[in-house]
Image (spheres, coloured by chain):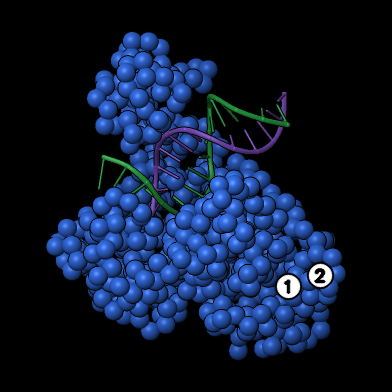
Chain colours: A blue, B purple, C green
Amino acid sequence: MAERWALAPAEDGGAELAPLGPDGLLAGPVLREADLASAVRGRPEVSRWVWRSTAEVYPRLLATGVRVERCYDVEDAETLLLGHEGRYGEPHSAAASLARLRGGPVPPDPPQRPAAPGAQSPLFEPEGVRLPLTDLVEVYTEQQRRHDRAGHPERMRLLTAAESAGMLVAAEMNRVGLPWSAEVHREVLHGLLGERYAGGGEPRRLAELADEVSAAFGRRVRPDLPADVVKAFAQAGIRITSTRRWEIESIDHPAVKPLIEYKKLYRVWVAHGWSWLQDWVRDGRFRPEFLAGGTVTGRWVTNGGGALQIPKVIRRAVVADPGWRLVVADADQMEPRVLAAISRDPGLMEVAGRETDLYQSVSDRAFSGDRDQAKLAVLGAVYGQTSGDGLKNLAALRRRFPRAVAYVDDAARAGEEGRLVRTWLGRTCPPAAGATQDAAEEAGIPVGEDEAGTDGRPWAPGYASTSSRARGRFARNFVVQGSAADWTLLLLAALRRTCADMAAELVFFQHDEVIVHCPEEEADTVVAAIREAAELAARLTFGETPVRFPFTTAVVECYADAK
DNA sequence: AGTTTCGGCGCC
DNA sequence: AAAGGGCGCCGAAACT
């Protein structure tokens, strides 16, 4: 029988805990134990722990080797519930929730802890404000009722459970770290950038390229200063409005080639160079801090280390332990498949019901076999393309897949009009600041920046202050990107359960891609587990659907060999 | 001098 | 060819 217990850490390293009934109410006396980890370790029959904050509790458990099967993160659920209720931005702490429940003054959320290089999750610095166990349970019980009032209660329950599972995965990945060879990394850096000079200046290759750029302009130009580059082009009789690559790469000038090369290598140097290695890699592991549900769409973010932006060339440094392998798995055309599942467009569901290249199938149906056009059209529909060939392509797409396009069009309209937009499971897009704002924009009155969420959770950048058109694009993308994030949470949860019985460890997750580090002999099992987890996740998330979610998997010793 | 914003680019 | 979604990170520039 699945048991559910509530848990609240105490100041002295101990904990309060108590069993919960099916209704979420206390089902027994509150117990007091001297050691948090022992209290959990001693109760293997508990299948779900209800606690205030996974970030507060779980790293401490993991530090003593204790894993849990499931949890329910009250403060994360509060954020999701508040969003669903159209109260985005209200304080999400358990203390605030309790205050709202009892009608007292609502405390603002405490500020977020800044990221520190190489830092583990804070073991001894509790984040946020603790509550006595009985208060926590009171909040939890009320949250259960709030799930019942959601548009789709069962989906909302799945969402909060799934994101709590995601937080367990994130905490475990933070602890394990991504296998990283500092030696290979240094070789790659040396090969790309050349020797480092004393004093921390540019490495040899960058200095050479900067000289080439200067030579081409006939004067000293610093390629890392956009203003300098714009001026230099102007003096050469070429007007540019920025130094973005797409704007300068078509220019016919001898400085362009070394300039682009410089930008590429400069990026590697500053973002993933020697100092990055120093800061973020220790004992053969890169330890970023993954944060499940860190964005409004539900995508994860990382704190520090740029773990979700590792350049392809640097992936050479991700190397499995001896005798181990990396199973690198990439969901094929995830977003259009998600669009098929949520829109239930018959044509798109049929296309997405096959495991073959979806863009090719779409192009066969609507674009005379031109795969690139089909891909552009699909991505344009999802991203809110508004001009160019995209519009023509969108029209072709609309003829063949009317319900799919209508689905994102409806979301865009809702966003423009300031109505709530939700993912399939019920994660809710932050609404516009107010209906008056559009009118103000219409009248040409600049609209001020909206107040940021007091809880430190991210708003869409400038979301509330952007044009209604931009909000439409955001909402259009939100329903697809966010529903995809819903599905990946269930995928991770399922995969985590399989890995729990093996030596295999989840070490990396990036939107539609997952890496499992495992002994060589487990690799085939892991590959199969990913396929099964994808199917289970699809069934749980979207219900009965013909849509398939195939993965491209590679069993490699080095991440760079996966593609 | 310290903090915030900007420009550019990495990933999906 | 180029415009559209989500992020984080860095140094420089712009601010206080």
The mark total stands at 2
Residue A228 location (% of width, % of height): 44, 20
Q: Quadrant of residue A2?
A: bottom right
Which residue is identified by label 2? A99
Badge 2 marks a residue whose secondary structure is helix
* Amino acid type of the residue tagged 2 in the rendering: Ala
Residue A500 location (% of width, % of height): 50, 70
Vertical side of A157 occupied by A178: above or below: above
Q: Residue at x 63, y 47 (%)?
A: A448
Residue A22 location (% of width, % of height): 67, 88
Residue A259 visible in the displayed image: yes
Residue A472 location (% of width, % of height): 47, 60
Q: Quadrant of the N terminus of chain A?
A: bottom right
Q: Quadrant of residue A260?
A: top left
Badge 1 marks a residue whose secondary structure is strand
Vertical side of A167 occupied by A324: above or below: above
User: What label sits on residue A51 in the rendered view?
Assistant: none
Subunit under mark 1:
A
Vertical side of A259 occupied by A340: above or below: below
Query: Which mark's residue is nearer the viewer, 2 or 1?
Result: 2
